[in-house]
Image (cartoon, rainbow, N blue to C red):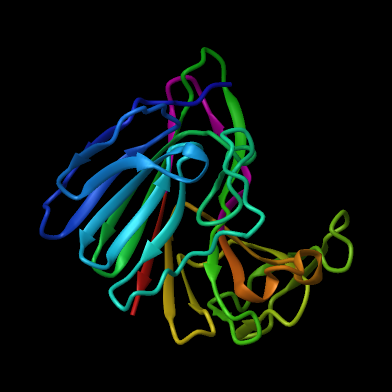
Amino acid sequence: MASAFPTLTSSSVNPLRNRCINTSFASLNREISTSGVQITEGVGKLPKLVLLFMVGIEAEIYLFGGCITSWKVANGKDLLFVRPDAVFNGQKPISGGIPHCFPQFGPGPMQQVTLNSKSLSTKFIITNTDKKPFSFSSALHTYFRASVTGASVKGLKGCKTLNKDPDPSNPLEGKEKREVIAFPGFVDCVYLDTPNELHLDNGLGDKISIKNTNWTDAVLWNLHLQMESCYQDFVCVENAKIGKVHLEPEQSWVAEQQLSFG
């Protein structure tokens, strides 16, 4: 099994409309600045990339794991959440933002990130560079800043569910009957064959559209009192590929996510 780990490249694509960057694990020891893109030192002295669209609109991406840790929009809000227990040591995955799972958290395949005035998009690319086939599953474990008591998700009614409450090791199969899904307590539920757009109300006055291409499934996640220090301040709405993807040598798999605000 193998996956592509390209060197860091950066570009401004139509600078009046968006900022685009390709990220992977990288090692940088100097500050670099280009039009709309800056790489500097972040928490734990880890290299961090700041993607700027215009004043007040920006995204931050740690090159370790290609983890997007911040997405600030024009009203000054950061719509992503990083857990207070997140570790920035270059060894453990960063707990928060948009970490990707391939097949676990941490450094992984190439990810392209694009920022514009009202959206943050990712293109996730996995390439088999080995001489034999391999299979994998994957997900974007996205943490949204939220008021958990007011947050809700629409768009999953009718989907097959694998509910890990009350027993995470033995998920209960079911079918989602609710139009609006809240987070009243422990939530860890997989949704299969989901539509390509969900809608999140973060309970803080913000409505976020979550669109995808080729992510066939979704996960709602908040471990409630198991994360007592912060569970009230976020919800996870994840795009996922639960079933296995099979790649022959030299084949690639691409999945995209677009988060839109307002």
Q: Quadrant of the N terminus?
A: top right
Q: Would you place residue 105 above or below residue 212 in this image? A: above
Quadrant housing the C terminus: bottom left
Q: Position of residue 79 (x, y in %)?
A: 44, 69
* 182, 90: nearer the viewer: 90
Classify residue 254 by image quadrant. Answer: top left
Residue farthest to the top, as pictured:
131
Displayed quadrant of residue 237:
bottom right
Magenta residues, dominant SS class: strand
Q: Is residue 259 above or below residue 5?
A: below
Closer to us: 145 or 208: 145
Q: What residue span does the magenta drawing correspond to?
A: 239-255
Q: Residue at x 50, y 67 (%)?
A: 195
Query: Is 75 colored magenta in this rendering?
Result: no
Q: Is residue 78 above or below residue 70?
A: below
Would you say 170 lies left or right of 240 here?
Answer: right
Left or right of 192 on screen, residue 142: left
In the image, 204 versus 88, the foreground residue is 88
- Which residue occupies 45% across, 31% down? 25
The residue shown at (72%, 65%) is: 189
Q: Residue at x 37, y 28 (%)?
A: 28
The x and y percentages for residue 36 are 19, 50
| Residue 37 image position (x, y, % from top left) | 23, 46
Give the number of callouts: 0
In x, y percent, where is residue 252?
43, 32
In this picture, residue 59 sits left or right of residue 161: left
34 w.r.t. 122: above or below = above
